[in-house]
Image (cartoon, rainbow, N blue to C red):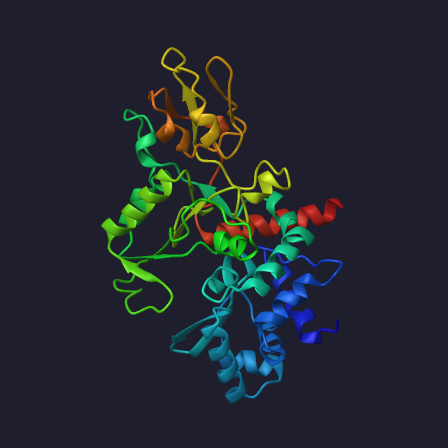
């Protein structure tokens, strides 16, 4: 199938971002872009970047008139493809990356066709991004699963992350929605992904998200943990804006473990599970609940601390309270980038060094 040159240029631009958007032999990455962008939108977007730039500058670089550019960015913003803000310079435009970015913004536009496009791309190239460090997401443990005598560091405390914000909302998990549309629904709840904002009332009146108060957001987390889902957030310390609740059966990241055999698709937390052997009855509930195959039960449960991501789901599920999370030795704790800009810089350097080593 012929694709407009604008889609090819946009694909190259997206792959130049640290997040990545690798090409496939069959052009599946272009199929996705053609489904979401008109050729005119793709042309304009191919001149945008992760940094905000003025609409006037963008129109000049793309050869598009200012009026046409304004209409195009308004259309793209309505589809969650670009971010717009108004400043003293006028309207500024930022192109979202593919993941985490404009793909997740399609949760309410996801249909069977787009679900299949993503599935083909996942197997064709996207899964190759899952072994790149720093990872897209990091695991944040369920708070009550950490031993009470251990001080929880703020960036590892999911309730603390919620408490630092001024607005909260819940929306459907795009991963479980995508798999369901393909005829592969899993048993986990769908309406459990959380968005957060520093701006009070940021989600009020939204057509796509259900606004919550803090208590409601914590209840959603509890529902997700009860269902055995793993809390993950952006892999940096500051300015966390969402909490995902993930599973290996549907999650576009965690499926890398189950389907691609990639062990480090998410950055583990600073904790690891430990079994109190004299209390363990070997019932196997924890082994069934662990999504990372980190637990094996013979007479009693045993933990593979290399595979363990420190999510705490096994702790919640143990009927004998024979498991707890302990802080890992300092030398085994993964460094977390402070800001998103630090994350971007680290990932850009990793991808650059990986290219050089080929």
Q: Is residue 63 above or below residue 309?
A: below
Q: Position of residue 297 (x, y in %)?
A: 50, 19
Q: Is residue 277 above or below residue 326?
A: above
Where the N terminus falls, by quadrant? Answer: bottom right
Towards the viewer: 210 or 82: 210
Q: Residue at x 34, y 29 (%)?
A: 146
Q: Position of residue 236 (x, y in %)?
A: 45, 47
Q: Is residue 317 left or right of residue 109?
A: left
Q: Residue at x 39, y 40 (%)?
A: 227
Q: Position of residue 356 (x, y in %)?
A: 73, 48
Q: Position of residue 9 (x, y in %)?
A: 67, 70
Q: Residue at x 60, y 79 (%)?
A: 61
Q: Is residue 276 left or right of residue 343?
A: left
Q: Residue at x 67, y 46 (%)?
A: 353
The part of the image, by quadrant, that contains residue 160 is top left
The part of the image, by quadrant, that contains residue 7 is bottom right
Q: Is residue 180 above or below residue 42?
A: above
Q: Residue furthest front?
A: 183
Say whether residue 94 is visible: yes
Marker count (numbered): 0
Q: Is residue 146 left or right of residue 93?
A: left
Say whether residue 12 is visible: no
């Amino acid at each position: 199938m012929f694709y407009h040159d604008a889609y090819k240029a946009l694909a190259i631009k997206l792959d130049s971002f640290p997040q990545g958007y690798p090409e496939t032999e069959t052009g599946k990455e272009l199929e996705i872009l053609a489904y979401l962008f008109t050729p005119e939108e793709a042309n304009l977007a191919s001149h945008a970047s992760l940094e905000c730039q003025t609409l006037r500058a963008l129109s000049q670089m793309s050869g598009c008139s200012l009026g046409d550019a304004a209409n195009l960015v308004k259309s793209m913003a309505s589809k969650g493809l670009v971010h717009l803000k108004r400043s003293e310079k006028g309207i500024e435009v930022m192109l979202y990356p593919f993941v985490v970015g404009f793909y997740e913004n399609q949760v309410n536009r996801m249909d069977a066709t787009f679900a299949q496009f993503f599935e083909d791309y996942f197997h064709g190239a996207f899964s190759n991004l899952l072994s790149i460090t720093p990872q897209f997401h990091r695991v944040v443990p369920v708070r009550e699963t950490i031993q009470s005598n251990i001080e929880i560091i703020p960036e590892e405390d999911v309730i603390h992350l919620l408490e630092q914000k001024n607005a909260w909302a819940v929306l459907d998990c795009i991963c479980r929605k995508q798999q369901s549309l393909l005829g592969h629904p899993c048993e986990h709840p769908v309406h459990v992904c959380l968005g957060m904002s520093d701006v009070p009332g940021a989600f009020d009146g939204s057509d796509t998200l259900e606004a919550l108060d803090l208590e409601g957001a914590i209840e959603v987390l509890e529902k997700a943990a009860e269902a055995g889902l793993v809390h993950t957030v952006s892999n940096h310390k500051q300015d966390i804006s969402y909490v995902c609740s993930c599973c290996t059966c549907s999650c576009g990241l965690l499926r890398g473990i189950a389907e691609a055999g990639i062990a480090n698709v998410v950055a583990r937390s600073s904790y690891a599970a430990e079994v109190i052997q004299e209390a363990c009855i070997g019932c196997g509930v924890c082994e069934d609940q662990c999504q990372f195959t980190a637990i094996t039960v013979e007479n009693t449960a045993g933990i593979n601390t290399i595979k363990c991501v420190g999510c705490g789901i096994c702790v919640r599920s143990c009927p004998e309270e024979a498991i707890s999370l302990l802080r890992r030795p300092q030398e085994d704790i993964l460094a977390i980038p402070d800001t998103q800009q630090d994350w971007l810089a680290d990932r850009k350097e990793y991808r650059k060094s990986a290219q050089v080593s080929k």
